Image (cartoon, rainbow, N blue to C red):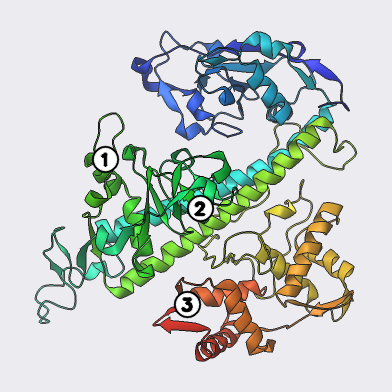
Amino acid sequence: MGAKWPMKRLSELAEFRNGVNYNKSSFGVGVKVVGVSDFQDYTRPRYAELKQINPEGIVTERNILRDGDIVFVRSNGNRELIGRSLHIENPPEEVTHSAFTIRLRFCAKDCFSKFFAYCFRTPVIRQALTAYGGGTNISTLNQDILNALSVPFPPLPTQRKIAGILSAYDDLIENSLRRIRILEEMAQNLYREWFVKFCFPGHEEYPPPVGEGKGEGPYRLVDSPLGKMPEGWEVATLGDLAAQVRRSVRSDEVDPDTPCFGLEHLPRKSITLADWGLAHDVQSTKLAFNRGDILFGKIRPYFHKVGVAPVDGLCSSDAIVIVPKDARFFSLVLECVSSEEFVDHATRTSQGTKMPRANWDVLAEYPVPVPTQPILGHFNTFVRDTVSQLLNLLFRNRTLRCTRDLLLPRLISGELDVSELDIQIPCGDWDAVPHEPDEAEAAPTMALGEGKPDEGHGSTDILADEKVGEQGIEKRPSGRTAPIPIEAFETDEVMAAFRQAARGRGVTDRDELIKEASVVLGYERLGSRVEEALRGHLRAAIRRKIIGANGLEVSIEAPAMADYDREVLIDTLVSVMRKNREYEREDVYRAVANHLGFRRLTDTVRTPIKCAIYGAIRQGVLDYQGDLLWRQ
């Protein structure tokens, strides 16, 4: 590493200090503290999640972290954690760090701390720090090791450019994580309002007005095992609505790259499961599950580990695989088992002392209020759409992390030279965050496919952006300090860009269409990486029949939805709908529209899709019951 740049020892650039010693009695209100458990795979602390300690007699001014500091894991029983680092950026309040960590603070000139924060995350330096960590049972990193560590030292402007490029990815990832938290809170709050407080749409009619001469009126509250409940609602048990599925599989009997979830991969109080291992890394018998199944961590249930499986795979037998008995109950079951009330119940009824375990036979008796079909339908549509957007954000973040991690060592080493690039980087910390829609703009979406990048048929992410109409994607403002990485765009968003670029142009060549699509996406110049990605997307647009091709010449296949042959639309229905899965009819309309590059579901877009659905039903391709559709 760093052959292009001169190398310097950290002892020439920075000074170090160990953190503060405290014990359980120190916890209280005072100063937030960064401990080993706060590192995980983050690049910066989650300040809102940090614990607090009483600083009296423990924390001095020298122990307070400053903007630009870097904190390392110093001591831990897990050698792989040694040397993990966090970059301190604009801490919102006073923050210190534990004795199991070391603080680095630059004192030399021409050091941009964020560049070195990324430098410490490169595989070469991470492996070096892990190897240096001595100790038999407890691995330890000390100040002498860090002082002797050599790091690349490019010119300050280059440091800023490299940090700016990499932090643009981290800013996009942070934005998506923020949206994930908000969406999860919205779904859980809606469940609590409708099914715990019974404040559902029309609840104001409960109880009916007295003395209006209408008897008891159309709505009234009645007694139930859960107390007063709206008339027409029923009380079921969780076991009535869902079942535990136990399909035991040996890890060596499946594809080695099969996703495998241990309890360590299930985050606390989040239904979005963003990380997993692979089958070749584990042994013993596991449980198989399908995408969309619900995983519930049964060991120490108070850890509140519940989530929706984003892929087919395997999981630890310490998780319960919960599958709704009817697709209509998916949202109700998910929000019930991920609620605080249910987790508290699982904790109270768990068995064992050191490692208490929840028991499905007990959990299955948990009472669940089941509303009338219209209310259940509205709730199911909202939560399913929310979950689908969570999955879209999850896979977007995985793509961003993968791209960032591929770029990281090549940028830090100088293999990719950015010194001559015309990138305007602020003198302070990088703050040019690419725009993401506000929560008010980001309506929940429903992905009917796998939720992965385009592979033949592509993702069916339906991003209902108020700024995007049927005419295509609104052009992003120019003059941005850094363009949005091409990998950050959803496949459907790029498809809509090609539709807009091709509309009204007649026959053109592929290079011209790619260039015009890049302009629609907000790029002032077409770099090689963007061009290569758009060529792949163009092939997908041709497969989807958004773009027609004749050799090197291309043109729009069908300017309007009504211009498509019905058989093409039926093929598209097959592309966006998986077998053995039920879909709301409205979700199918939106999925087909987005698959073909239409970003707004107007009547002129909806009507041809509706006719295609009727045709598919007559041909036996689809079947239906009410508003539910499924592939035969």
Query: What residue is at 61 percent from the left and 30 percent from the top?
Result: 89
Q: Earlier in the sequence, mark 1 or mark 3?
A: 1
Q: Position of residue 600 (x, y in %)?
A: 60, 74
**What's the distance in space between the residues labelled 1 and 3, CA to CA?**
38 Å
In the rendered image, which quarter is residue 113 located in? top right
Residue type beneath disc 2 = Gly
Q: Which mark is residue 313?
A: 2
Q: Is residue 365 above or below residue 540?
A: above
Left/right placement of residue 232 relative to residue 436 reads: left
Q: Secondary structure at mark 1?
A: helix
**What's the distance in space between the residues labelled 2 and 1, CA to CA?**
27 Å
Q: Earlier in the sequence, mark 3 or mark 2?
A: 2
Residue type beneath disc 1 = Thr
Q: Position of residue 223 (x, y in %)?
A: 11, 64
In the rendered image, which quarter is residue 560 located in? bottom right
The residue that label 1 is drawn on is 347
Q: Position of residue 541 (x, y in %)?
A: 74, 71
Q: Residues within 10 Å of mark 1 (few under 14, many from 20)?
A: many
| Foreground disc of the pair 3, 2 | 2
